[in-house]
Structures are given as structure tokens and as C-alpha cells.
Image (cartoon, helix red, strand yellow):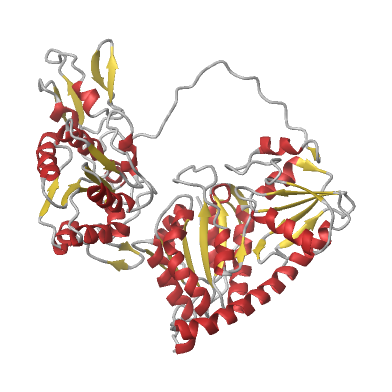
Amino acid sequence: MVDLLSDSGRQLLLGNEAIVRGLIESGVKYASTYPGTPSSEVGNNLEKMGEKAGIYFEFSSNEKIALEVSAAAATAGVRSFAFMKHVGLNVAADPLMTLAYAGVNGGMLVMTADDPSCHSSQNEQDNRYYSHLSLLPMLEPSTPEEAKEMLPLAYEISEELKLPVIFRTTTRVNHARGVVEFKKPIDKPAVGHFDKDFKRYVNIPANSRVNRIILLDKNKKAQELSESSELNFIVGDGSSEVGIITSGVSYTYVKEFTDGADILKIGFTNPLPEKRIADFIRGKKSIIVVEELDPFLEDQVYRIIAQNGLSVRVYGKRDGTLPREWEFSPDTMRKLKDIVKITEFPQAMEKTTVKLPGRPPTLCAGCPHRGLFAATKRAVGKKDVIYCSDIGCYTLGGQPPFNEADFIICMGGGAGAAGGFSESTDQKSIAFLGDSTFFHSGIPSLISAKFNDHKFTMVILDNRTTAMTGHQPNPGTGRHFGGVETDMVDIEAVVKSIGVEFVETVDSYDVRKVEDVMKRAIDYDGVSVVISKCPCPLELKKEKKLVPKVCIVDQSKCIQCMTCLKTIACPALIKKDGTVVVDETQCIGCGMCSNVCPKDAIGVKQ
């Protein structure tokens, strides 16, 4: 059992658990996030034990707010930590850019958890560029242990420069496990004081122009810190003609699968230690830059080579030696075999002839979203409709048999796009978004739709939790952790307060009734809102609130029409020997299939 509150010892920790331990040891007293994989477990752990650790923690309504509340704490002198997945920093970028001008007093880190290979994301953008754009220092750990050890140093850098520091991780750091040595936490104040400074904190143009110069001076100081930082180090005796420059998780692949080359491992990746890089390159015949995603380091290595009049062959992404897409693997290192010695791989196991079935992501058995999508498809019929979906469990509504996802870009983007389609086409638009997404960025889209008289249907799938990222609370559930108790925000009341006239709340398990509501919503001349308010079964299971029931098929009534399979496609329904049977190990007895059976052949029993 992991105990992140111990004062000493060694434990095997997930990267995100190691980061939480690092926050405790660093004396952090304020943390905030909007949940998103691969950073989710940091918030989940802080939710459980933040109060005992003396850390105020909150799930903010979106990443922008998460950054703003932590910025306020750090400005008042309290060490803070705002964290999010990589696309979340797009949302938080607006305050981040100006916060760099104002700076902070207590240390502040902004963790961006990047997701190479898009394991749980809509893109694999490289957020290292945000450090260039904002002129903020950036640190990158390679392992869970290094992530924990790097955090106290990051806070020292932040407080020395009076700047927030970007702490960039990737999925393989967040979700790897490693042995971590615990150290005694330092004590930092939990309550600060804001000292007014109009020129520093009120960034109107006259003040911003001055603060820009101050930020550039701080960047020069950061450059000096990077040159002397222990986070940048060389592995090897310097005698090799081949040098490898690497950072982040790529260092672990280099360390394990290459041999005979000198390695410059960079942990302080912005500003780069340019003099140290130039000195490392001198005397080398070949330099290999190993990094995931974009040639962020490589392009700067080329610049440093040119500015220092060096002549050396560089291998990396620009010449096609290494791929620019997706995360690396041991096989990626094989691409370097003609340049550097590659450690022999262990003999591979014999390939099996057994073909495993594919396991694409799917909505869970008994998920209420299935009923909503089934009812919507029936209500639409042959109408020409554009389905604008969003980021969450309901994204899976794009799969057969529903096929109700035509346009997806970002959180809350479906509702905005639906308004655009309503004005630029003759087609009807339906926007699907979740309860947490509604609070994140759906409310402004709805206000804009009402203001501009857009004509589309917004469907809010309120499953009473933030499900896909690990069942975190949101404003619609209320807060009940960390010693703070708040009431839930009523979605229907919010929608009505905006002035929307067509608002109906439905139970998605009653597919027939939902179909009727959706028909009227689609035909409504204006913006209409349908709220599907049904708890996630997994959340009910976790809270032990799920009443044990199971569906049964009366084979004497079943006519093998397969309507239940074609309409609901629940994994608990199985086609066997030409008929439908129920897998009782998956079935939760929701009765959704019973609701669509034309012959009432499916019932529910305790």
C-alpha cells in the first residue's frame, strides 16, 4: 500500500505519485487542476490526502482557472502547483503569458503532461514551445525518481527568478513506476499576504512594456542558472567521437540501448546551457539529438553550432534519422545502429500464431449514453444532421451502431462549431458534451448561441462525474473532500438563467421517451437543450450504490429481430446460436434493452 505521507523510507511509486511526494517534500501548500490524462493521478491523490499533507487542493472548472488561482497563491508568497494535460495548457496559455510579466513571489510550477502517441488525447503537440513563447524556465524529468528529486530544485529556481517554472512531463514519466527515496519535507507557509504593486501586477500597456524588459533580464539570469545547473550533466569520459544530446524520457532509452558514446543529459531545457552544449560538441565527429516529438533541442543545437563556428555532423529528426511522430521505443534506438553502438537486445520470444481479438474503447455495459445516442438516432431518422461531439466518454458515440460524431476539435468546441454550422449550412446541428465539459467551456458557447440566435440542439450528458479521466468531481456534483463541502450547481437552472426556453431533463434509460424529447428539440426553432441526467454505473459501483439487478431474455417471446443489439449495442448482450442472451457478469440490469425490445421479451430481475 502506497503511503505518500511517510517521513522516510523507499517505495515503488507511479510517476504521478512520485510527483505528489515531491510536492509534499517541497512544502507546496496550494495545488489546482482540471483533470486530464496523463496527469490525473496527481489530482486523485491530492483529493484523498491533500488535507492531511497540509495542501489546499481544488478541481477547478477549467485549466485557465486552475492556473489563475495557483498564480494568486504564489503571488501572495505561497508555494503553488498548477497542473494539466498538454492540451489543457492551450486553455491556460492566456493568463500564463502575462503572468510571466508579473512574476510570482512564492515558488510556482506549471506542469504540462504531454502525451506522445496520443494514448488518451486528440493530438500530440509538443508543449516545450510554450517555454520559448512565454520566456519561462522549463525543467524535464526522465523518471519518477528524478521527477520527485527535481521538484524542490524547480521551486528554488522559481523563487530565485520570481517566475513560474514550466515542469514538462510525458506519459511514460507520469505512468512509469520507479523506486523513490523519501526525504523529510520542508516547511513553508500555507498563508501569505499580497503586497500591492501597481506597476508589476497591473499589466496595462505602459506597465507591460517595462515588465517585458524585466522578463528578458530574468531570462538572461535563467540562462546562467541553466549553465551551472546539476540537472544538466554528462555521462562518459569525454573521449568518444560520438556525442548524444537528449532530454526527458528519451534519456532512458539512450542510457539503456546505446554504448560507447558520451551523453549530455539536459534536465533544464529552457533556457538551454548553450556554452555547455558548445563545449560538449567540440572535438566530436558526430552529434545525435534524441528527443520525442518535435526537433526542439535539435534546432537549437544547429544554431549553437553555427554561432560557435563548429563543424560536426548532426543526426536527428531534420535528416530523417529519427521519427518526428509518436513516442520512442527500444526499436527506435535501432535506427542509430550505423552511427553508434547499440546494446544487443535480449533474444525475442517466438512469435505466437494466436490472434488476439481487437479491444477498441467502447461505452461500458449499462452506460446511459447508449440510450441517449440510440434515441437521438431514432429521432433524427433521415434528416441531414451534423453531430458535433466533444472530449469525453461520449466521444465513443462516434462508433457503430451510433455513428454520432462528425466534428471534434477540443473541449467545448462542439457547441461552438454547432453554432457555426447552423449559420453557414442548411443542416441541423446537434452538440454533445458532458457535465464537466459544460462547466469547463460549454457555458460561454451556450451564451453565444443565445446571443446570436443560433439554431441547434445542445445535449448535456450529465453522468454525475468527470468519468473518462477517473471519476473526479465537478461543479455539478458539489465538492466533498479536503474539509470543504459545497452544494452542487444545477445545470438546468444555469441553462434557464441564460434565457434558453427549450430545456428538458431526461432519463436516458427510457429510450422511447428520450426519442420523443429529441424529436421536439431538433424541430425547435432556436437553441434547445436536452439534459440526460443519469449517474455513471462505474461511479455507482464505486460508491456501492448500484442495486444488484440483471436482465433476462424470454426466449419464448424473442423473435431474433436483434433490435436490442442494433439499437443499444450493449456488451452485456450477446448473439449466440442465432438468438440473444445476457452476459450476467457484465449486465447491471439497467433495463435499457428491455425498453427498446418490440416484443417485451427482455425483463429485469433482482
Residue at (35%, 34%) from the top-left corner? 362
Residue at (58%, 70%) from the top-left corner? 135
| Residue closer to the observer: 319 or 483 | 319
Answer with the quarter of the image where residue 202 lies: bottom left
Answer with the quarter of the image where residue 475 lies: bottom left
Residue 97 placement (x, y as % from top left): 49, 70
Q: Residue furthest top?
A: 577
| Residue closer to the observer: 274 or 479 | 274
Q: Is residue 474 visible?
A: no
Which quadrant would the C terminus be assigned to in this image?
A: top left
- Whether 589 is drawn above or below 425: the answer is above
- Whether 441 is drawn above or below 504: the answer is below
Residue 445 placement (x, y as % from top left): 27, 58
Q: In the drawing, does residue 268 fall left or right of residue 380? A: right
- Whether 412 is drawn above or below 93: the answer is above
Residue at (59%, 64%) from the top-left corner? 132
| Residue closer to the observer: 71 or 389 | 389
Q: Is residue 251 visible?
A: yes
Q: In the drawing, does residue 46 fall left or right of residue 519? A: right
Residue 443 placement (x, y as % from top left): 25, 60
